[in-house]
Image (cartoon, rainbow, N blue to C red):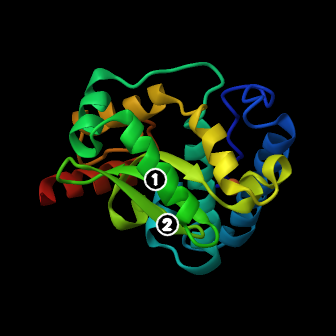
Amino acid sequence: MQFTLMTLPYEQTALEPHISAETVSFHYGKHHAGYVNKLNGLIGGTEYEDKPLEYIVKYAGGAVFNNAAQVFNHDFYWYGLSGTPTAPSVELSDLIERDFGSLEAFKELFLTAAAGLFGSGWVWLVITKENKLEIEQTSNADTPIRHGRIPLLTCDVWEHAYYIDHRNARPEYLEKWWKLVNWEFVSDNLAKVENDPIAGYSQSCNDDNEVCDYVDTMQENERTAT
Ligand SMILES: [Fe+2]
């Protein structure tokens, strides 16, 4: 199976003026596409050739993991942005207030974590198995789903996410990024977790084929193991 680059859910100009079309063109069209192409080149003829992306992220190592995780992370990043204003659901707002005090306090903590992450990586809002919201930093390609945590939102702090618009000024990028957060995506991710705390981020797999059978079996095993 060959992976394909996701289709952006908006035009490349849709995030302007906060993130330029030129940045989207390079970030999505060169960097993100590059991870997809490299992953396809690496998995041909291996045990991962016909596995779902999330399986590869969970179990592969080395370059296969790095490229698969970067595909997952970037998919998540683009879905988490919107050029039109959105708002958190009541459920999400309640959890943010409970665990961070307020949306403004959460913003402060999240952007501080993003600004302070050393080198390249990602900052995430995750929900733990204890139903608690936490901010998590991951380095390079690392990703919460590798460690059994469920992501609700991510910010890419690799320099390739902002160097065209802001050179090396990461905090400037973070303030702009915050204005684009797609709270509907974050709220939907939370709702999926509340509906199915084990599968969480996983999309339901309804196709009648071997890969979906495998995913369904794996998810069922995880449900019955808890
Ligand atoms: Fe990136």
Quadrant placement of the C terminus:
bottom left
Disc 1/disc 2 C-alpha distance (Å): 8 Å
Earlier-in-chain disc, 1 versus 2: 1
Whether 42 is drawn above or below 215: the answer is below
Residue 56 spot, x, y in % from top left? 51, 65
Pick whichever, 69 or 98, lies toward us.
98
SS label for mark 2: strand
Quadrant placement of the N terminus:
bottom right
Residue plotted at (77% across, 29% down): 17
Residue plotted at (55% across, 45% down): 76
Whether 187 is drawn above or below 132: the answer is above
Pick whichever, 202 or 145, lies toward us.
145
Q: What residue does disc 2 label?
A: 138
Residue 40 spot, x, y in % from top left? 71, 62
- The image quadrant of residue 22 is top right
Pick whichever, 153 or 85, lies toward us.
85
Q: As shown in the figure, which amino acid type bears the numbered disc 1?
A: Trp
Q: As shown in the figure, which amino acid type bears the numbered disc 2?
A: Thr
- The image quadrant of residue 141 is bottom right
Q: What residue does disc 1 label?
A: 124
Marks 1/2 in contact by CB < 8 Å: the verdict is yes
